[in-house]
Image (cartoon, helix red, strand yellow):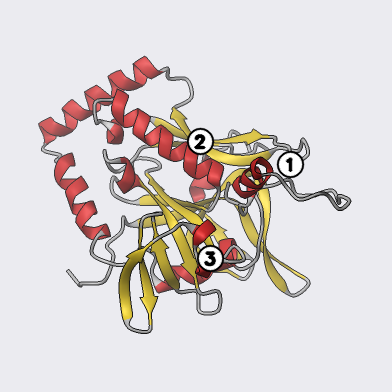
């Protein structure tokens, strides 16, 4: 295995809740209120739509707001990785990745492990340069048991919700997370900052039409079938853990330019499409600052 190269789950396509459009000569993120499943091929007008994008709709007029999925691994952190990430907005390369305690940072002396004070206290993170950044890999369909679709987000609501769900599902299933029939679901919420207009984020639930008791029964049966067939989930999780740990940064140089364009090139909040103008106001309270920070998120809630 090549050292310094993170070995990540094979990706068949992307899941997003928005797209990048060209407007007045600039490429800017545009929000949406539905999922879009794309391939890994990019054309003049953006990423080409994956065939599953239309297959999962009841009709062409319906909006795709839920996606039936399974997970690759039993360990939550292998399915969903979230950290504070600082990208060089010119080259698109990651410069620093941390978890609030420690970080790996590119310096003039090479790669270094340093303390991570979190974006609020880090001088390099001024101006919103460093953001929470999460990547979720899921299986869609049964054609490829190891080929995944990736959902990327810098949204506090999605990151917090997905992390909680994964740990809860792992606990109640007896560490059979990879066997549960689950569903990605787009949810809306309104906050004071959104002025009553809904914002959208991603949740992970039991599959539509299946209650939790049935989902646990299905997970137990699938786990037994896999063990009888010789499927070694423990070894698969360990292989993924070693692969992620083999490199300093997860995203490849081929991916980071599109990531920076979608999430880091300009400031786009997890907010309604139209923000009403407001008159000058007094200095915000701590509560308002925290709420505002939780809304600062681009098109992928």
The answer to whether 239 appears left or right of 78 in the picture is left
Instruction: Name the foreground residue: 126 vs 213.
Output: 126
Q: Which mark is residue 203?
A: 2
Instruction: Name the foreground residue: 119 vs 241.
Output: 119
Tag nearer the camera, 2 or 3: 3
In the rendered image, which residue does mark 1 sit on?
Answer: 194
First-in-chain label (2 vs 3): 3
Residue at x 30% of width, y 31% of height: 170
Residue 7 x, y percent position in the rendering: 27, 62
Q: CA distance from mark 2 to mark 3?
A: 28 Å
**For residue 45, above or below residue 204:** below
First-in-chain label (1 vs 3): 3
In the rendered image, which residue does mark 3 sit on?
Answer: 125
Residue 19 x, y percent position in the rendering: 62, 57
Q: CA distance from mark 1 to mark 3?
A: 25 Å
**For residue 135, above or below residue 256:** above
First-in-chain label (1 vs 2): 1
Verify CB contact (< 8 Å) between mark 1 and mark 3: no
Q: Which mark is residue 167?
A: none
Residue 187 x, y percent position in the rendering: 60, 34
Residue at x 84% of width, y 48% of height: 276
**For residue 226, above or below residue 209:** below
Q: CA distance from mark 1 to mark 2?
A: 19 Å
């Amino acid at each position: 295995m090549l050292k310094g190269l993170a070995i990540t789950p094979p990706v068949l396509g992307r899941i997003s809740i928005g797209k990048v459009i060209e407007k007045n000569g600039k490429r800017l993120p545009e929000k949406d209120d539905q999922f879009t499943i794309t391939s890994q091929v990019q054309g003049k007008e953006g990423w080409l739509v994956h065939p599953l994008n239309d297959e999962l709709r009841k009709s062409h007029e319906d909006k795709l707001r839920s996606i039936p999925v399974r997970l690759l691994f039993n360990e939550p952190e292998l399915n969903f990785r979230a950290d504070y990430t600082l990208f060089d907005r010119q080259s698109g390369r990651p410069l620093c990745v941390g978890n609030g305690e420690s970080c790996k940072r590119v310096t003039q002396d090479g790669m270094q492990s340093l303390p991570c004070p979190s974006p609020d206290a880090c001088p390099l993170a001024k101006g919103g340069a460093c953001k929470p950044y999460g990547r979720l890999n899921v299986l869609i369909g049964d054609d490829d048991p190891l080929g995944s679709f990736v959902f990327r987000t810098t949204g506090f609501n999605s990151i917090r919700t997905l992390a909680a769900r994964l740990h809860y599902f792992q606990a109640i299933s007896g560490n059979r997370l990879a066997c549960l029939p689950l569903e990605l679901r787009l949810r809306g919420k309104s906050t004071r900052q959104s002025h009553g207009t809904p914002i959208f984020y991603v949740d992970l639930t039991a599959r539509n039409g299946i209650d939790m008791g049935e989902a646990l029964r299905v997970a137990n049966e699938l786990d037994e079938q896999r063990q009888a067939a010789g499927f070694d989930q423990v070894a698969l999780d360990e292989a993924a853990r070693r692969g992620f740990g083999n490199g300093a940064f997860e995203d490849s140089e081929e991916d980071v330019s599109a990531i920076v364009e979608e999430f880091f090139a300009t400031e786009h909040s997890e907010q309604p499409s139209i923000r009403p103008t407001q008159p000058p106001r007094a200095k915000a309270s701590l509560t308002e600052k925290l709420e505002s920070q939780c809304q600062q998120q681009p098109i992928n809630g």
